[in-house]
Image (tube, grey):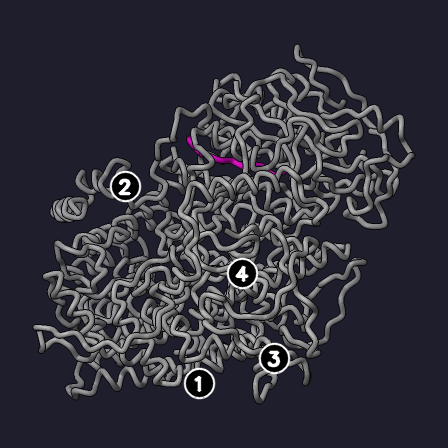
Amino acid sequence: MTAGLTRRHILQQAGAGFGGLALQSLLGADGVLSSANPMAPRAPLFAPKAKSVIFLFMYGGPSHVDLFDPKPALAKWHGQPIPLWKKEDSFMVGKTKNVAMKSPYKFAKHGDAGIDMAEVYPNLARHADDLCMIRSMHAESNNHGPALFQMNSGFIQAGRPSMGSWVTYGLGSESDNLPAFVVLLDKLGAPVNGALNWSNGFMPAAYQGVPFRSSGEPIAYLTPPKNVSASQQRARLDLLKQWNTEYAVANPAESSLAARINAYELAFRMQMSATECTDLKGESSAVRQMYGLDHPTSAHFGKNCLLARRLVERGVRFVQVYSGGNEGPKAWDAHDDLKRNHDLHCAETDGPIAALLDDLKISGLLDTTLVVWGGEFGRSPVAENGKGRDHHPKGFTMWMAGGGIKGGMIHGATDEFGYAAIENRVSVPDLHATILHQLGLDHEQLTYRFTGRDYRLTDVSGDVVRELLA
Amino acid sequence: MKLRLLAFMAPHLMPRFLHRSLLVWFAVQAIGQAAAPSLEEGRQHWAFQPLKHGVLPKVNLDSWPKNDIDRFILAKLEAAGLKPSHEADRATLIRRVTLDLIGLPPSPEEVAVFEKDESPRAYEELIDRLLDSPHYGERWGRHWLDLARYADTCGVHNDLDRPYAWKYRDYVIQSINDDKPYARFVAEQLAGDEVENADEQSLIATGFCRNGQSNDDNMGKTKEVLEQYRVDQLDDVIATTSTVFLGLTVGCARCHDHKTDPILAKDYYSLLAIFNGTEKLGMAKGAKDTKDKDIKDSNQVMALIEKKPNVPRTHVLLRGMAAARGDEVQPAMLTVLASKPIAFPKAEGTTSLRRHTLADWITSPSNSLTWRVLANRLWQHHFGTGIVASPSNFGFTGATPTHPELLDYLARELIANGGRWKPLHKLMLMSATYRQVSSAEHGADPDNSLLWRMNKQRMEAEVLRDSILTASGKLNLKVGGPGIKPRIRADLLDASQRNKWPALDKETPEQWRRSVYIYVKRQLLMPSMELFDAPTTTDSCALRMQSTVPTQALVMMNDEFVEEQARFLAARAQRESGDDLLKSIERLFHIVLSHSPPESRKTQAIEFVKQRELASDRMAALTDLCHVLFNNSEFIYIE
């Protein structure tokens, strides 16, 4: 209990000349009250390869067989039933028929490694040797809501903390002025499940994802009401700090009182730093062009990719960038017309993703930033409504780059139709375990106790996919 | 361990690796951990023992106890060499007890009257008055709504609106105001269609079984998926029922015998057998059937009922999978708790009466667990921490009681009072333990687990907002009805595409109602509620966190609501105290903090207002001061 005495002692000292150095030492990252700050940086379990994660979430389910996992058999069997397909694989019962559908896109091999990629990702193709293609992903629900929950939190139902929450719970924040877990949404808004996709679940609210907007106010309630000036706000906060400090000194047993003073100061700084971070004016026109900001199709996702780089640069731990919002064709959910849907979404994301990888590489940040690309599932090898594809979780592709992951490799495989992952299968918990591992966290040891039980992001399964590690 | 991940999943999609790794995991757990207690060991667990009729402990400081609670507390303090703290002053007491019982601060006039009242019964009369207030139910009903994972929308997928969910909220508030005996309260919520004198209100009460998340616009399209969805929904009912009423995590036994408690998978499915004949009445707006057609449901209540006495056969479902049927089970209570089997009625009449039988068993005076759990919940809300610190887990992994004899004494008092809460509130509030100051110092027991002082508590989200509205004079005390949607900054609304929250430019008195009436939209919780730890509603919430994060500061600094109410408060202070600045400041302290400002605060406040006046005018300067008062720790922490 010496901490209590020390704290009290220091608080009394702080009271003598509060606001000055004493308060600084009290509240700073190394101060005795840093334990009161849930976002204080914590050392990983072992030396990490990555400090940050950028998860490019292609919401709706991008088609593996049309982007990264070419299947000549689908052309051969086009219009014919395939032997593997079962009636109950359909989500859109009645609309999806067991009729193979060939890809509308041409594939080519790229990079020294010869990674197969469809023609709709021409810029990304330049990075083939940076990418680690996982062609053997599989997930457990063929329905957006539950599948999003699984990809984000490991569980098919709501209520568990999302991966970003686990990471910030495990590692704290490297940024004094910005939230540790940031979510960037598509221009069309949030995916289904809304804010539950970046929920802290049963963890403290501090670990919740904070949505940033790329226009207007970046964080909720970041700016004072219209009629309140900056000097007026500072004057209020000065008196508040004085009173709150006196109160904290008089009540040394309540550590949260000191944490409150800290929270107000961080909030005040955040008003400037978050605004500074989202202000892209300082970026050169070359950079803006590179990210596709001057092109209406790619401008929004491009802006978010650029923002993701700026956030990571400033120490933000986990950034999730969504492509696709709302529902149906607005996301990657190509039920009716695969080509039309993927033409659009690839055009929105190809340039920006390539630019992000270039940019991270130039600055050296790619070494410590793990970039993950993927959706909540893939798409059916058989046709829905003739030209579309249905939801399909039994086999699909995701890729990773940077952050200590091998580039220019293909891991795992689906069968000849792209129906199911058959070689070196990677489950969602395996993926989660691998991501945590790159951050220096052991998925079996990163636990959170709730209602008498230790919970994990990976629950009862998950293996680090060692073959992917550089 | 609860394998919810298997939920929603079509059985044929069960990946073989998962099954295999589960088996491996179970094997590892079995080796690596002590095995779950046997039924025999389980029956020895403290929480399952009959309530003790202990003798009152002997204490030395005989002058301190005001009732028997204090004897239990004092005995432990003396054994640890500690002394209780002195009684808080009158202003602190009335503020504490008013916020505690009705969730609103006392008016300066009420404080003044109470401070002057020299009657020895003044404090007791205050408690009686507050317990009679209709606002008591709004405050304590909110605690129950946390447990009942109450919300106005479905949560999953498109977050459909539940147009009649609010009736359950109003039912809870009314029941608690009426001090309904707990046995009846439980029976109505589990079996409102089966209770004696069932009526619309008791049907509405079964909303308890319907408040969980649902996926009504996207349940699935095949028979197998729909059956899995149905048992998943019942899983939510079983898990909630057992944690709320029994403080046991029975949901963990869905896939296998409980890992740490003597609860068998068979027990879980015997509970499922109790609910297995139920049907939903009242669907969400926009619910779809398997052909994506809107479900027409004109029922204006949201209930869970039975329409016939015959319940389908119930089987153990291996790993929780609807398609993987094991042995057939009969309805039964938890083996570890029921020493002999409970007889369930024969299938006749209009329902099976199984849920009523369950409710009767839960609240039977001989079921000590139920009464301990309830007594502990009431204690926890008054004192900040329960006698058992894990209020919904009284199992082997739960906390052990700091004062087991006191807990049993309180549980016996509850039973003796017919399961009514109000006498127990009064007992706790009348104690010297409750009346202690909260700021005293001691070297030992820094966590205050022995209660040598009162705990300070941060206002809950609702209390904070309601207290601001009370101070500004704008609180609208209208009771009940559909939820309100106060202003949320417009650019926040795009995080929720569907069933949008309206973008308001200006709030009106309709939005200034008590926070318990705020519409609970699962995908877009009111930021000022969510940031101050209002529950996320995915599971039953027995204990809110008291987190401190910068985003709380942002919303308190920058939300137009706080700004506007500060302006109203400044106008009120001027109106009530004229142009004299000192009087205005004194008035403000009385309104916001229930006491007069000490000299140093007066000087600081006057200086601040005069300084701010240079840049604007008196009204604006006072608004600045009011804003500081609302953000002030002394306002947000209850002494």
Give the residue drawn at x 37%, y 47%.
Answer: B550
Amino acid tagged 4: Asp
Camera-nearest label, 3 or 1? 3
Give the residue drawn at x 55%, y 77%.
Answer: B205
**Residue beneath disc 1:** B178
Kindly identify which numbered label has been placed on residue B505: 4
Tell me where residue A103 appears, x and y as whole percent: 82, 29
Q: What element carries label 1?
A: loop
Instruction: State how far apart marks 4 and 3 are (Cα).
Output: 52 Å
**Residue beneath disc 3:** B353
Quadrant the C terminus of chain B occupies = bottom left
**Residue beneath disc 2:** A34
Tell me where residue A160 appears, x and y as whole percent: 51, 49
The residue lying toward the viewer, choosing from A156 and B164, is A156
Tell me where residue B294 appears, x and y as whole percent: 77, 64
Tell me where residue B305 appears, x and y as whole percent: 64, 75
Main secondary structure found in the magenta portion: strand
Label 4 crowd bin: few (<14), some (14–19), many (20+), radius 10 Å? few
Instruction: State how far apart marks 4 and 2 are (Cα).
Output: 40 Å
Instruction: State how far apart marks 4 and 1 are (Cα).
Output: 39 Å
Label 2 crowd bin: few (<14), some (14–19), many (20+), radius 10 Å? many
Instruction: State how far apart marks 1 and 2 are (Cα).
Output: 47 Å
Amino acid tagged 3: Leu
Q: Is mark 3 on a helix, strand or loop?
A: loop
